[in-house]
Amino acid sequence: MIMNIWGRMKNIFYSLIIAVFPIISCYAEQPCSLKKGKYVSVEVKDILCLAQNSGKDIALFYTFADWCSPCKKSVPEIVRLSQRNDIALFFIIVDRESDLYSIDRAINFLNRNVEQPHIYIISDSLYSPQNRIKKQSIIQINGKKEREKYENFLTNITPPEFKVTTDIGKSILINGEGNVIFITSYEDKGKNDKSQSSVYQKIEECIKKERDK
């Protein structure tokens, strides 16, 4: 009984905290008709719309979770890369919408480390119908536990010329026409590349190639 009450109190507490933080990216939301709330959840079509209305010719969407240490370490360089190349930057949280604790931690981290970050959460509608009710379906992919909705999200947004990999901390480049032009993978990283400089180099090469068309 006490544990149930405590669980409810925790959810209320985190709902209030999330409501306080300004995480809505207003400049692109109106044309995309995104539903406003304590946060904004998005599907693939919404992300493509955000890219088309970002005010930049290219937008970078970075998949993120607070429990992903490499993701957190990469945030400063992702921000510098976006500034250096004058592209729009959005952060996409992968946690389930009901996981207020994890969402709150992710939002807090991004607000502390990024100036006015544009933050969205992958919609739970990307669960399969039978698992949408459960809100948390964990499946085995390539020997690792990954969320079902994240796999569905990546499957839907990844063009056929790119391999679908389910790593977190993925950079998705989308041009102003709403076309996905590049998606990073753990396979892009060199064997001895702890700083992921080889991944950032590929991103910048793709940006240059797109602008040279």
Image (spheres, rainbow, N blue to C red):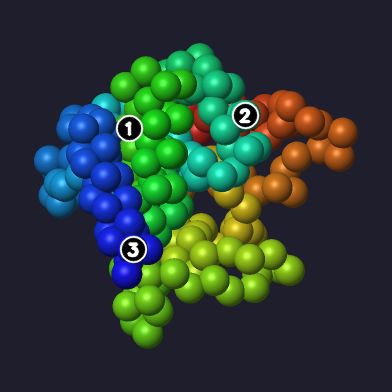
Disc 3, disc 2: CB below 8 Å?
no
**Of helix, strand and loop, which one carries label 3?**
helix
Task: Return the mark for residue 104.
Answer: none
First in sequence, mark 3 or 2: give its number: 3
Q: Nearer the viewer, mark 1 or mark 2?
A: 2
Residue 4 in the figure: left or right of residue 16? right
Residue at (45% x, 30% y) in the render: 109
Between the residue at mark 1 and the residue at mark 2, the CA separation in whole angstroms equals 18 Å
Mark 3 packing: few (<14 Cα in 10 Å), some, or many (20+)?
few
Q: Disc 2 marks which amino acid?
A: Lys
Task: Return the mark for residue 118.
Answer: 1
Q: Nearer the viewer, mark 3 or mark 2?
A: 3
Asked whether the viewer can see residue 138, the reply is yes
Q: Nearer the viewer, mark 1 or mark 3?
A: 3
Q: Report x, y in % for residue 172.
A: 50, 43
Q: Disc 3 marks which amino acid?
A: Ile
Q: Report x, y in % for residue 103.
A: 39, 46
Residue bearing the label numbered 2: 73
Between the residue at mark 1 and the residue at mark 3, the CA separation in whole angstroms equals 38 Å
Mark 1 packing: few (<14 Cα in 10 Å), some, or many (20+)?
many
Q: Report x, y in % for residue 123.
A: 32, 59
Residue bearing the label numbered 3: 2
Residue at (15% x, 46% y) in the render: 36
Q: Disc 1 marks which amino acid?
A: His
Disc 1, disc 2: CB below 8 Å?
no
**Of helix, strand and loop, which one carries label 1?**
loop
Residue 129 in the figure: left or right of residue 77? left
Residue at (58% x, 64% y) in the render: 146
Residue at (65% x, 48% y) in the render: 185
First in sequence, mark 1 or 3: give its number: 3
